[in-house]
Image (cartoon, rainbow, N blue to C red):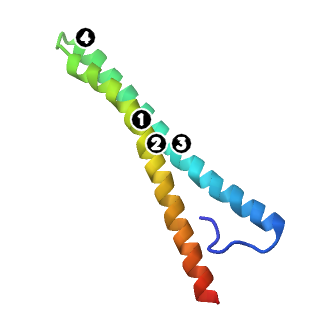
Amino acid sequence: MPSTSIPDSLVGRLRWALGESLVVAGIFAFWILLAAALNTALGILTRVLAALNVHAIYVVDDLAVLWPTVVPLAFVTAVLYAVVRAGTLLIDQYRNE
């Protein structure tokens, strides 16, 4: 986890910003990997059901709903992280004054 305060030096601030950017990128990567895993699992389930001659049209329809929900969830999670992180930095700043 990144440090609890912003460093004073320019290089330190650049490293801090890079660390925060990696956290936000990790949030998006988590949601994308989760959606890909669910998509793969539902695809395998659909093929197994088709091989068993079970009509799997409802499972196939659910695949189309999965990807449009990933982007808003990833965005909301990243914004929530940024708001909480900014709040903790502000509280830390005022507590140290």
Relative to 35, does residue 52 appear above or below in the rendering?
above
Q: Is residue 94 above or below residue 40?
A: below
Decide if residue 42 is in sight here.
Answer: yes
The structure residue drawn at horizontal position 37% and vertical position 37%, both measured from the top left corner, is 69
Q: Which of marks 1 and 4 is nearer the N terminus?
A: 1
| Residue in the picture at 64% in, 70% down | 3
Residue located beneath label 3 in the image: 29
Q: Few, some or many C-alpha atoms within 10 Å of disc 3 (few <14, some 14-19, many ≥20)? A: few
Q: Name the residue under label 1.
A: 35
**Where is mark 2, residue-wise?**
31
- Disc 3 from disc 2: Cα separation: 6 Å
Residue 59: x and y in percent read 25, 23
Query: Which of the two labelled residues, at mark 4 and mark 2, occupies the earlier sequence position?
Result: 2
**Spatial CA span between label 1 and label 4:** 24 Å
Q: Distance between the residues labelled 3 and 4?
A: 33 Å
Q: Who's the residue at 18% across and 9% down the image?
A: 53
Q: Which of marks 4 and 2 is in front?
A: 2
Q: What residue type is labelled 1?
A: Ala
- Tell me the element at label 3: helix
Relative horizontal placement of residue 12, taking residue 84 as reference (left or right): right
- Please name the residue that numbered disc 4 is placed on: 51
- In the picture, measured across the screen, residue 56 lies left or right of residue 74, that is left
Q: Which residue is drawn at 45% across and 39% down?
A: 71
Q: Which of marks 3 and 4 is nearer the N terminus?
A: 3
Q: How far apart are marks 1 and 3 (CA)?
A: 10 Å
User: Which callout, 3 or 4, points to the residue nearer the camera?
Assistant: 3
On the image, which quarter does residue 61 sit in? top left
Label 2 near label 3: C-beta < 8 Å?
yes
| Category of crowding for the residue at label 4, using alpha-carbon neighbours closer than 10 angstroms: few (below 14), some (14–19), many (at least 20) | few
